[in-house]
Image (spheres, rainbow, N blue to C red):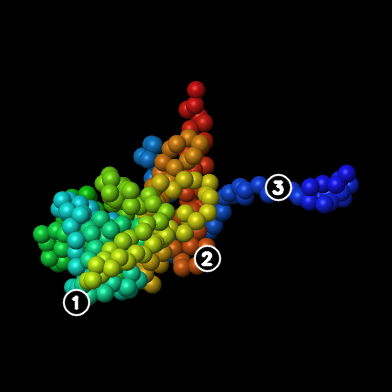
Amino acid sequence: MLMPDGASAATKKTVPVRKPATPVMHRVAIPKTTSTYVLDLSTDAVRTADRAEVVRPIASLTKLMTAMVLLDAHADLDRTIVYNPKMHYAYRNWMHFATGDRIRGRELLYATLTGSQNIPARMLVPLTPYSEEEFVAHMNAKAQALGLTRTTFVDVHGLNPNNVSTASEVAKMFAAALMYPDINDALARKSVSIVWGNRWNKRRQSTFLHTNVLLKKKQLFAIEASKTGYLHEAGDTIAMRVRDPKSGRTAIVVTLGEPRRAPRFAVARWLSESATHIMQIAGANIAP
């Protein structure tokens, strides 16, 4: 008897069906130069705190405070801002803005948070009543109001290494930022498409993947929201809210000063896996 593709029943080979790879735990040694902090949100228990009180650069995690000050000022996110390189340029113009380009505030916010773009962070400032200097002053005032006594900001995008904090205070800042629906939504996305127009009203678009590379592969934990950063002086920085898929419990994971190496955010991934394991055990112990 012939099979449909012409192979005989006797010689037809069975091709095994590949199952999706099951994520495994990735134990790593935590470098002595890295600060870590893990807060179990179900119990408020601190699970990990290595060098969590060391003041150090936080790079683009600065943008968390930028977004909070923007929204505290009740900025109209539907308002259009015109790009002026003398006012708004910052390293680097990945979106290829040209003088006279027009873009809405909401697009700028998502480019700033999901795509971690620097020019959009500066373009958000005119949506408020503040000059850029006044805006940064409000960022520092907001930090003090949140009890972040070792956190200091000097710009809105994080390019200056004098934007500093500690892992424990970044966790508090991140938790506060996620209370804003617009921020939470932006940081929960895996990608974002930004649309704007040039001076001749020609439509332009840029699509950014979230800068958290851990979102590219299935993990043992669910990433509900995250923000990353990098500077040579800061190393890799990341803040995440992760969830144990089994128990539904959540935790905030922060690492500052991870070495810039492959795979990126290896320490944050290991801490998230460990936290997930602990939350699963805790959930099992209280299950009826």
Looking at the image, residue 27 sits to the left or right of residue 36; the answer is right
Q: How many marks?
A: 3
Q: Is residue 65 visible?
A: no
Query: Which callout, 3 or 1, points at the residue further toward the start of the chain?
Result: 3
Residue tagged 3: 17
Front residue (pair 146, 175): 175
User: Going by the picture, which residue comes out furthest to the left?
Assistant: 129
Name the mark on residue 262: 2
Disc 1 element: helix
Q: Residues within 10 Å of mark 3 (few under 14, many from 20)?
A: few
Q: Is residue 91 above or below residue 150?
A: below
- Element marked by disc 3: loop
Numbered tag placed on residue 86 in the rendering: 1
- Residue 72 locus on image (x, y percent): 17, 51
Distance in Å between CA atoms under marks 3 and 2: 30 Å
Residue type of the residue flagged with mark 3: Val
Residue 122 horizontal side relative to residue 130, left or right: right
Q: Nearer the viewer, residue 242 or 17?
A: 17
Residue 61: horizontal and vertical position, in percent? 32, 60
Residue 131 percent across, percent down from the top left: 12, 65
The extreme bottom residue here reads: 86
Residue 205 location in percent, x, y?
34, 64
Residue type marked 2: Ala
SS class, disc 2: loop
Q: Residues within 10 Å of mark 1 (few under 14, many from 20)?
A: few
Tell me if I can see residue 110 in this picture.
yes
**Residue depicted at 23% across the width and 59% down the height:** 104
Marks 2 and 1 in Cβ contact (< 8 Å): no
The mark that comes first in sequence, 3 or 2, is 3
Q: Amino acid at mark 1?
A: Lys
